[in-house]
Image (cartoon, rainbow, N blue to C red):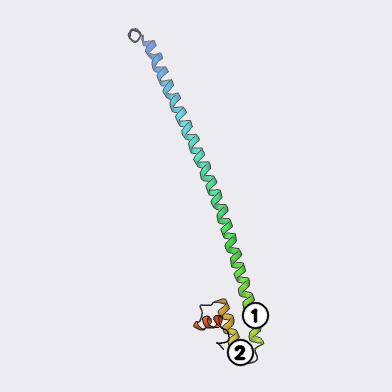
């Protein structure tokens, strides 16, 4: 303890500068670690965003492909229905062909569709 009592003003100044330097060094180290941790979090968030965008693009592509496939199915059904109506021998057959075509596109459109799709011979 005699050491502290014998310090002059210059000695106290040197001790104060040393303590402040150590505090500043510690603060800079903590700040650097905080910045590094924040950079890691940003990189992880960027990776997550990239993965999400990739998944969303894949989902959008799958939805578009299913919609294109459904459109193709509807176009083929309409063409088949139109051909069946045009080649029907009489009006009753043409009406049955039209109903069959509608029921293939939208089975919930008419109550007769359930019967027609289950047994086409019963509806005419």
Distance from label 1 to label 2 (Cα)?
14 Å
State the residue in front, 104 or 49. Answer: 104
Circle 1 Cα neighbour tier, 10 Å, few/some/many (<14 / 14–19 / ≥20): some
Label disc, if present, on residue 49 of the rendered structure: none
State the residue in front, 28 or 41. Answer: 41
Circle 2 Cα neighbour tier, 10 Å, few/some/many (<14 / 14–19 / ≥20): some
Q: Considering only vertical position in the picture, is 1 above or below 117?
A: above
Residue under label 1: 80
- Return the x and y of residue 86 as percentages of the image width and height: 66, 86
Q: How many marks?
A: 2
- Return the x and y of residue 64 as percentages of the image width and height: 59, 63
- Return the x and y of residue 81 as percentages of the image width and height: 62, 81
Q: Considering only vertical position in the picture, is 57 above or below 23?
A: below
Please report the residue visible at 61 percent of the width from the left and 89 percent of the height from the top.
93
State the residue in front, 117 or 79. Answer: 117
- Return the x and y of residue 120 as percentages of the image width and height: 58, 84
Tell me which label, 1 or 2, sits earlier in the chain: 1
Q: Where does the C terminus fall, quadrant-wise?
A: bottom right
Asked if the residue at tag 2 contacts the one at tag 1, i.e. Cβ–Cβ closer than 8 Å, the answer is no
Which residue appears farthest toward the bottom when viewing the image? 90
- Check disc 2 and report its element: helix, strand or loop: helix
- Check disc 1 and report its element: helix, strand or loop: helix
Q: Answer left or right for 3 relative to 59.
A: left
Q: Considering only vertical position in the picture, is 77 above or below 18?
A: below
Please report the residue visible at 58 percent of the width from the left and 57 percent of the height from the top.
58
Please report the residue visible at 59 percent of the width from the left and 81 percent of the height from the top.
101
Residue under label 2: 93
Q: Where does the N terminus fall, quadrant-wise?
A: top left
């Amino acid at each position: 303890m005699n050491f502290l009592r014998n310090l002059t003003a210059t000695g106290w100044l040197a001790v104060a500068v040393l303590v402040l330097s150590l505090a500043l060094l510690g603060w800079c180290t903590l700040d650097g670690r905080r910045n590094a941790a924040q950079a890691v979090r940003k990189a992880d968030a960027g990776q997550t965003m990239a993965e999400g965008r990739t998944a969303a693009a894949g989902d959008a592509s799958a939805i578009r492909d299913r919609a294109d496939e459904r459109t193709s199915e509807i176009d083929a059904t309409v063409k088949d229905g139109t051909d069946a109506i045009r080649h029907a021998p009489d009006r009753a057959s043409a009406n049955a062909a039209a109903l069959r075509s509608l029921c293939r596109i939208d089975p919930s459109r008419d109550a007769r569709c359930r019967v027609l799709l289950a047994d086409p011979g019963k509806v005419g």
